[in-house]
Image: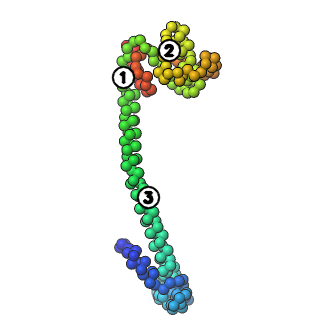
Amino acid sequence: MSKIDYQALRMAAENATPGEWCTDDYHGVIADAGLNANYYIASCSGPDNRSNKRFIAAANPAAVLALLDELEYYKSREERVTKLVMDNSTSWDALYKKLEAAEKRIAELEAREIKPAKGEVLVVVSGFTGCGKSAIAGEIEIAMKAIGVPVQWTNGDAEKRMTGADWLTAIEMYKPTVRIVEVNVPHAAGIRVKGGE
């Protein structure tokens, strides 16, 4: 199909007989109003003349102009959306690169093997949040103090907001299990520890 010249089509529709077009009982398409009212706009013959008449009447200038206006609207809308996507693509690219870098760094941290020195205690706590985590923190502090080991929290007093009685209640509720590993490592989530040298 050859490329349609929309501007030429618009000019042709604007210059054609305006108004409704209709078919007659014979072989033609006539204008329903205006200077050419009741004159033949087109004549059709042959076995498909009725279908052709109906098509020509339906494809009148008003219908063609309405279709061209709609096409223009959607082309303009497509251009605006394309521009918006292009404007935002650079920021999406930057965010995607940051995400990839963060995922790579997390994978590196999780994959590295740490050979800890003796002397410090790292407590691995997982699967608990809120009161459950505080209960574990409380149990750790009570246990460590009972054996004479001073407790120092890496996040200040954030885990010590609960009172001893609250901790005991939470411990009873959650019945946490604590695994204590002797290691000397930075307190970072996701670091796998091998051995206790």
Horizontal side, residue 114 vs residue 134: left or right: left
Crowd tier of the residue under label 1, counting other residues whose Cα lies within 10 Å: few below 14, some 14–19, many 20 or above: few
List x then y, in percent, for residue 160: 55, 20
Q: Amino acid at mark 2?
A: Val
Quadrant for the N terminus in the image: bottom left
Query: Number of labelled discs?
Result: 3
How far apart are labels 3 and 2 at the CA level?
Answer: 58 Å
Residue on which the image places disc 2: 151
List x then y, in percent, for residue 144: 52, 12
Crowd tier of the residue under label 2, counting other residues whose Cα lies within 10 Å: few below 14, some 14–19, many 20 or above: few
For residue 35, above or below residue 86: below
Answer with mark 2 or mark 1, whichever residue precedes in sequence: 1
Answer with mark 3 or mark 1, whichever residue precedes in sequence: 3
Residue on which the image places disc 3: 81
Q: Amino acid at mark 1?
A: Glu
Number of the label disc, if any, that sits on residue 4: none
Number of the label disc, if any, that sits on residue 113: 1
